[in-house]
Image (tube, helix red, strand yellow):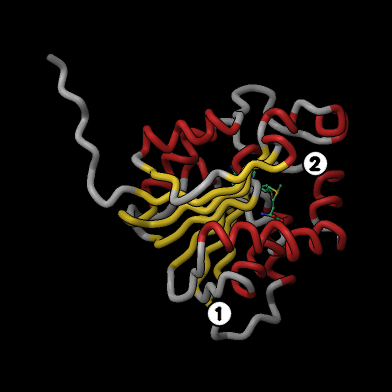
Amino acid sequence: MKMNNFEKTIMNSSARVLFLDRFEAPLLRSLGGDLQGLRVLEIGCGQGHSTKRLIEQFGATSVVAIDLDEDSVRKARRNLSALSPHHQVQLLVEDVSALNMPDHSFDAVVDFAALHHVPNWQQALSEISRVLKPGGRFLFEEVTRQWLNRWFARTFLLHPKENRFNAEEFVAEFGRLGFTLTGELVKKRKGDFIFGCAIKATTTIPRSSSR
Ligand SMILES: C[S@@+](CC[C@H](N)C(=O)[O-])C[C@H]1O[C@@H](n2cnc3c(N)ncnc32)[C@H](O)[C@@H]1O
């Protein structure tokens, strides 16, 4: 689900970009590590501010960044046009719930606060798992239903009404997909926001046999 104009204005304001630069990106970098030399997929890149941090702070040199919103992707192309040709950045209009990409094609997938906009976020996580190589990393910053249920979000912002997740439900999906958290799940504002990094299993998990 696309952001409404009010959320777009907030997310792309200089105050929020400063917060992304000084707080969100460094915290995720500390949990997920360097991305230099890796093929990275960013889901829900918006107008490219988080994509720029992947290059500047995570050391990424090869990024495919997708967003559902054509207007945001167009602005991201403009915002990232000054990057050196050394950086391979591809910006595409795509839905994370149905990725038009081959299996096992990325070393890392990064989610800067996109999945809470996706009605079937479990399907989106399955897609992320499908395109990640075994042993690949999934770095995430997410917004839980605790925050989505707060007055400000309910009044001014637009999010899926059903199937919202809390921290525990989000992490529980990792078990289904064979992901393991690499370290702690960081909760901010008492669980309104979560940050973490998970690794995809290198071998297929055998299904338990029925007796
Ligand atoms: C809160 S914004 C975050 C934007 C950017 N990552 C940032 O940190 O500035 C969430 C973004 O996810 C995008 N989005 C929502 N649903 C999506 C979907 N199904 N597939 C891809 N992108 C989606 C929205 O259009 C929006 O740009």
Name the residue beneath numbered marker 2. 4
Placement of 84 over or under 203, stated as above or below: below
At label 2, the amino acid type is: Asn
Name the residue beneath numbered marker 1. 87
At label 1, the amino acid type is: His
Relative horizontal placement of residue 93, taking residue 104 as reference (left or right):
right
Mark 2 or mark 1, which has the lower sequence index? Answer: 2
Placement of 6 over or under 57, stated as above or below: above
Q: Residue furthest top?
A: 211
Relative horizontal placement of residue 187, taking residue 158 as reference (left or right):
left
- Image quarter where the C terminus lies is top left
Placement of 77 over or under 147, stated as above or below: below
Picture residue at 38% right of the left edge, 57% below the top: 136
Q: Residues within 10 Å of mark 1 (few under 14, many from 20)?
A: few
Element carrying mark 2: loop
Residue 38 versus residue 2: which sits nearer the camera? Answer: 38
